[in-house]
Each structure stands twice: as structure tokens, then as C-alpha cells.
Image (cartoon, rainbow, N blue to C red):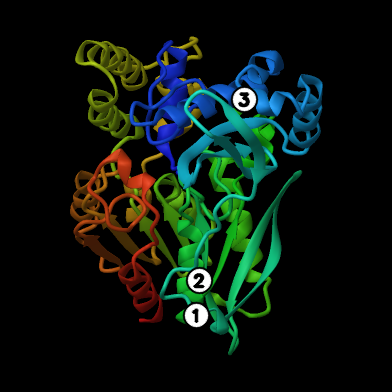
Amino acid sequence: MQEKYLFHRRVRQFLLALGLIVFLGGHSSVAIAQQDNQYVAKAKVFFDAMEHEKFHEAYQLLDSSVQRVVSEEQSKGGWKHIRSKFGAFRTIMKSRTEELKPYIGVYLTLRYDSALIDLKVVFKDKAAIVGFFFVPPLQYTMPPYADTSKMTQRRVEVKTGDFTLGGLLTLPREGSNFPVVVMVHGSGPHDRDETIKDNKPFADLAYGLATMGIASIRYDKRTFIYGAKSSSTPATITLQSETVDDAVSALKLAQKIKEIDPKQIYLLGHSQGALCAPRIAKATPFIAGIIMLAGNARAFEDVIADQMAFLLPQQLPKKQADSVMEVVNKQIARVKKGPISDENGKLPLGLPAGYWKDLKSYDQVAVAKSLPMKMLFLQGEKDYQVTMTDFNLWKKSLASKSNASFISYPGFFHLFFKGEGKPSDYDKDGHVDKKVIDDISSWIKK
């Protein structure tokens, strides 16, 4: 599931490796989306110059009225002083404009290693910048179904060997011996809330479940905190080290928390987290059940092929999209045929051979069939990343399993709120729908 959720980040990295820069559900500092207005475009040019320490170029974009009171050296020094606190730059997550008559403000939401911050760039006309500031980003708002008077929260740590991940335990305020849901992220380096633009689906789930009397644990993903150091070398990272090991540690942590009923520990996986859920459950036979949100039943490479075939024509001219798709299909064929080896640029998404070997050795459907605990499969019918094809395959494969339940939601996309089944769904603020909270709660309490 970054966000993952999700998959788009890896698609963009893959396309960059091919020399193509496109807009796939997020903003790049080197690519201007067609729909961006000229204020946003100019703000991005300014940020790009400052970020790459081309301070003279950036200074020339400032209005002469600003240059008369602030020297180039002062603008450089101020930027470097504040910028040094944020860590390495990752991406521009989104942009927005605000009319501040007679000015126009552009806000670029920037993701750094240790900060999420808005750069506010102010224009008096299209030609010149009259001010720039770092300001806090828009804050997440509680979903309407969450009742903060019914919950409490405290920090926890998920530890696996030398890796320590910060997390949150969200508890109902009244009572004891609570069931608990441990949440496992989708692909990409996600924080504990699985933040995607302004949306925080894991926070929604935690607050909604706490209101219903169910505790939860959510934690930062290893790749979000440790990046390339998540494994001894980038080439050795696998599904096991990226996701499974820490999920097992989080579930074992839940056993030790005094407010939790150790017989009522549940695993919730979203997207890639759902793909891993049967494998995690196999390693933690003490859990009571698994909840799979948008989990693929097909091989990962087949899902990639479908996603790319859907997305590329929306992002590139047909000839270019066909050319990229041809490369993708050749890479997928190498994974299918084998042997899988680390030939630069010749495996899907640039993932190392060890990662693909790990994936190929894992049959999530077969493992799910062997599980004795109850299982709940949830799917958005407008999801173009993990589709109803996967959901129906789960239903067919587990038709004889009385411990498996299935619910699909018309009009919901990958984050389980209303969408149109397009990449632009991620640009809208929303919350995990209350129906999903109610269905999970009812299933746990059966």
C-alpha cells in the first residue's frame, strides 16, 4: 500500500527510470500537471530552484519590491536555516491556490523525511513573487461518525530486531478487555495513518472503531522511517522484511496490552497489507481473524499489468503509452517465465529479484484456504487498482470455507469512500465510509 497509496509512487519511479515523467495521482517537482494554473507552475519553478540551491535563479523570480528589502544572501540564508530542519525532500504531495485580494497564494504541500509542511508562495500578478513562507499544512478533520468523548489514545512502539516503529494505540474510553484491530499498510512508505494527500484512512478506521468499542493499533511502516536502510541492502528487501515481520511484531505487542482481550486480536490489511494478511496470520495462529480491504487474489504482476493498462492511456499519448506498455509486458513475462535475476531495469517497478522471488513463492489464496480463523473480505466496486476480478476470485476460491465472509460496496474506490474509479479520486478529501466501520464492527462482535 506509497501510498501508498499507494501503487502510484512505484509506477512513477518506474516511468522515471524509463525517462518518462508523468502525473499519476500526485505532483512531482519536475513535472507540471496540465491542469495546474500558471501561479502553481511558477511556484513550483521557484521551489525547484530553491530546493536545488539555485538561489540566484530563484531570487530573480522575486518582485523588485521584495529585492529592495531582502538581499539574495538573506533569502538564501533564511531558506537554508529553516530547510535544514526537515530532512531529505521526498515529493510535492499536492497544490492549491487561494485568493487573497489583491494577491494570489499558492500552497505546495511538501513531504520531507521529518516533516509535512506547506510552502506558501504569494503573487501580486503573474510575473513576480512578493513573499514565500513555510506554514503548517491543512489539518486532518475527524470523520463525522467519530466521537472523541468515547476514546483515548497513547503511543506504542513496534519493535522487530533493530527496527523500532512509532505507533498509536486507540482505545474506547469506557470498559476493558477490548477486541483490537492491528492495521497493516498498502504498498509504499506509509505513515501510521496511511496518509494519502489529505486523507488518513487508518486514522478514520481507528476513530470509527473506538467509537464502536473496538481498540486498534496503527504504526509507521518500516520503509517510511528507515527508507533504504529497511534492509541490509536495497537488493535484499522482500515482502517479509518490508511488511510481514513488523506486522507479526505488532500483533504480538497487542497480546501484552492489559486493556486488550488476547483472544480477540484481529489483523486488518489494506491493499498490499491485505495481500500479506494470510501470510501474517499463518505466523500468528493466536489471532481471531483477518480483515482484507482490497486484497489482490491474482499474482502481483498481473495486477500491475492491469493497472498500467488502465493508467497509461490517461497519462501519455497513445504511441508513448503503447511503447511503455510493451516494456512492462516484457518485464512481466520475465517474472512469469523465470529465472528471476537482477538485470537493471528488466524487472517490473524496479523491484529487486529477491523481492519478486519472495512474491512468486507466496500463494495468498492457498494460504487463506488453510487458515482456521474467520476472514472478512471487503472491496470497493469502483476500485481500479485491485478490482472486482480479484474479489470474485476470492469468493470463488473460498466458497467452501464457512469462515469467510464477503462484502462489496458500489461506488467506493480504493480508500473505501465514494469515487468515480479514476486517479482524480485521490484529489478529493474524504473519510472511510461509515458502512465499512459498521460492517467490520458487526463482524468482530458476532
Residue 43 vs residue 210, the one in the foreground: 43
**Side of 77 relative to 112 (left or right):** right
Cα distance, mark 1 to mark 3? 48 Å
Mark 2: few, some, or many residues within 10 Å (few <14, many ≥20)? many
> What residue is drawn where x is 53% and y is 67%?
286
Mark 3: few, some, or many residues within 10 Å (few <14, many ≥20)? some
Q: Nearer the viewer, mark 1 or mark 3?
A: 3
> What residue is drawn where x is 76% and y is 20%?
72
Mark yes or no: residue 187 visible.
no
Judging by the rendered image, the residue that carries numbered circle 1 is 147
**Side of 307 relative to 353 (left or right):** left
Residue 145 vs residue 347, the one in the foreground: 145
In the displayed structure, 375 sits above or below 413; it is below
> What residue is drawn where x is 46% and y is 42%?
96
Element marked by disc 2:
helix
> What residue is drawn where x is 33% and y is 49%?
414
Q: Disc 1 residue type?
A: Asp
Q: Nearer the viewer, mark 2 or mark 1?
A: 1
N-term-proximal mark, 1 vs 3 = 3
Q: Are marks 2 and 1 in contact (CB under 8 Å)?
A: no
N-term-proximal mark, 3 vs 2 = 3
Cα distance, mark 2 to mark 1? 8 Å
Q: What is the number of the mark on residue 63?
A: 3
Total numbered circles? 3
Q: Disc 3 residue type?
A: Asp
Mark 1: few, some, or many residues within 10 Å (few <14, many ≥20)? some
Judging by the rendered image, the residue that carries numbered circle 2 is 207
**Side of 366 relative to 254 (left or right):** left
Horizontal and vertical percent position of residue 31: 45, 22
Horizontal and vertical percent position of residue 423: 31, 39
Element marked by disc 1:
loop
